[in-house]
Image: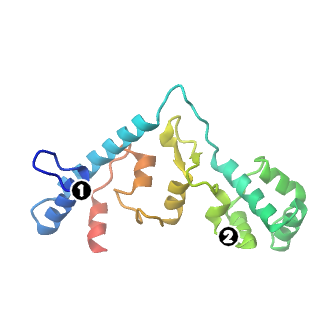
């Protein structure tokens, strides 16, 4: 949306203008980095103002819970019992018994990455489908802090894990990274040079 003479340019318009200025040589990477950092701080403040209500504290499932639920959901969709899943895993080199599957599905045992890879292949689904809920709007607690910056939606986590979605493949303006990191870390300006080479 273009601004008229009475409105200040939007953050997006400012960024576009500054990127063009860097490309033309009339602006520096440091100026662009400063504007991006300011946008990150503003995004975090806006997100915190929207999402935080001290009287409405919602507990989100953690990745252990969503992984246990995902494994159970896919096991049931495949029509397997816990014993059949344990048997299939054992045939592929995992030392599983039915009790192992019970412990996994009840969060009493964490699943290792090699086990997740085998499960992904057994169920013929991407690994990310095992660990994240089907509902992309479901928030997941990452155990990083007590506020919403310690959680992301399933959709944002999927993007961080796979690098695919509508917002691109990373960089200092990548929304899922901003949601998780906010202004807690200053992004190095060297990242901007990476974009120029692509």
Residue 43, image x and y in percent?
Answer: 35, 44
In the picture, the quarter occupied by the N terminus is: bottom left
Residue identifier under label 2: 125
CA–CA distance between discs 1 and 2? 40 Å
Mark sitting earlier along the chain (1/2): 1
Which quadrant of the figure has residue 27?
A: bottom left
Residue identifier under label 1: 1
Q: Nearer the viewer, residue 58 or 27?
A: 58
Residue 154, image x and y in percent?
Answer: 56, 53
Q: Nearer the viewer, residue 92 or 156?
A: 156
Residue 115, image x and y in percent?
Answer: 73, 64
Which quadrant of the figure has residue 173?
A: bottom left
Q: Is residue 93 left or right of residue 67?
A: right
Mark 2, other Cα within 10 Å: few <14 / some 14–19 / many ≥20: few
Q: Nearer the viewer, residue 38 or 29?
A: 38
Residue 110, image x and y in percent?
Answer: 72, 52
In the picture, the quarter occupied by the C terminus is: bottom left
Residue occupying the point 53% across, 34% down? 146
Colour mapping: rainbow
Which quadrant of the figure has residue 114?
A: bottom right
Q: Is residue 53 above or below residue 188?
A: above
Residue occupying the point 31% across, 55% down? 188
Could you say whether the residue bearing mark 1 is in a helix, strand or loop? Answer: loop
Residue occupying the point 64% across, 44% down? 61
């Amino acid at each position: 949306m273009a601004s008229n003479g009475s409105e200040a340019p939007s953050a997006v318009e400012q960024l576009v203008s500054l990127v063009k200025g860097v490309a033309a040589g009339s602006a520096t990477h440091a100026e662009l980095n400063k504007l991006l950092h300011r946008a990150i701080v503003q995004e975090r403040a806006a997100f915190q103002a929207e999402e935080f209500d001290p009287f409405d504290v919602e507990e989100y499932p953690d990745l252990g819970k969503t992984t246990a639920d995902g494994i159970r959901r896919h096991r049931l969709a495949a029509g397997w019992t816990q014993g059949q899943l344990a048997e299939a895993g054992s045939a592929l080199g995992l030392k599983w018994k039915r009790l192992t599957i019970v412990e996994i599905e009840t969060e009493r045992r964490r699943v290792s990455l090699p086990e997740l890879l085998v499960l992904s292949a057994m169920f013929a689904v991407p690994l990310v489908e095992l660990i994240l809920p089907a509902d992309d709007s479901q928030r997941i607690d990452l155990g990083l802090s007590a506020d919403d910056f310690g959680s992301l939606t399933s959709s944002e986590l999927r993007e961080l894990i796979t690098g695919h979605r509508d917002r691109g493949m990373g960089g200092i303006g990548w929304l899922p990274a901003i949601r998780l990191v906010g202004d807690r870390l200053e992004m190095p300006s060297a990242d901007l040079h990476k974009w120029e080479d692509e």
